[in-house]
Amino acid sequence: MTKKFRFGVALSTLKSRSQWREAVRRAEGFGYDVLHLPDHLATPAPFPALALAAEMTNMRVSPFVLNAGFYRPALLARDVAALDLLTDGRFELGLGAGYVKEEFEAAELVFPSAGERVDHLAHTTGYLREHVPNVPIMVAGSGDRVLTIAATQADIVALSGSRPNSTADDPLAELVDFVRERAGARFGDLELNLTITALPHDGSGVPKILRTTGFGQSLTDEQILKSPTTLTGTPRDMGDTLRHYAEKYRITYISVPQLHAEAFSKVIALLR
């Protein structure tokens, strides 16, 4: 393993300035390295919320991930450059193709085809790579074209846990092998990220499953429990699983949603 572990947590509620400040401070106190913020119409606007967060923490900050379809590259590059400046270089840009039709409609935007959304993601990533080259870029997705963009243009690849409709005995290995093949010589420089969606909150070792309605989550509980994005057992068991992921798959950047922030902090303490 050549890279150290990094840990990110995605906060998703902003009810007041004081509540947001407290949530950010708690996240840093739990040991997280990166503060994430999703980009959905029901969540806080990423850029102002992350700018405020950066004022009160030493953590890095990152939208996880921006819906590229909501933005035009030149205007996005301006915002990215401003956040990079205002955070003293602690800003990381997460990008995805966007997938929620209802959100495009609510924003009064045409919902492009899947291919058109990926084309726009590729164009946006390339533009930002050229115009804000010092800002690390993460690309998230599971389809072959998005993973190819991530492997060839991004600094960080956010993995979903398996490729779509995979029947592989080891879906995570299949996913990483695909990225490795597409990345070629630059694979060793990539950072691989995985979001843990289910993990135990008590001594039972039974995972608590996150359900986010409205965002296309269609997996059954059984499928979620079998996924590489689920951790089970004690904090030490979970830490051992993540060490295995780091050694076998080179996955060293682990993220969790806000629901799991406190429970997962026990694992962070064991992996430091």
Image: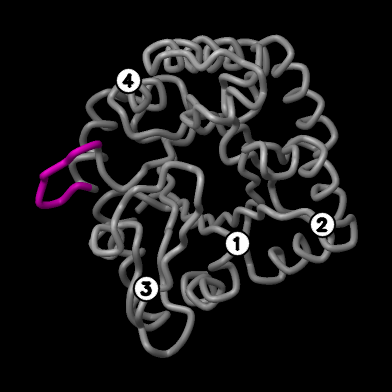
- C-beta proximity under 8 Å, tags 1 and 3: no
* Residue 184 seen in the current view: no
Q: From the viewer's side, name the closer residue of 202 and 113.
A: 113
State the SS at label 2.
loop
Give amino acid for label 1.
Gln
Disc 4 to disc 2, how far (Cα)?
A: 37 Å
Residue designated by label 1: 258
Camera-nearest label, 3 or 4: 4
Mark earlier in primary sequence (2, 1): 2
Q: Is residue 169 left or right of residue 93?
A: left
Residue designated by label 2: 15
Q: Is residue 168 left or right of residue 211?
A: left
Disc 1 to disc 3, how far (Cα)?
A: 18 Å
Residue designated by label 4: 145
Q: Is residue 237 left or right of residue 50?
A: left
- C-beta proximity under 8 Å, tags 4 and 2: no
Residue 219 position, x and y percent, is 31, 52
Magenta span: 164-171
State the SS at label 3.
helix
Mark earlier in primary sequence (4, 1): 4
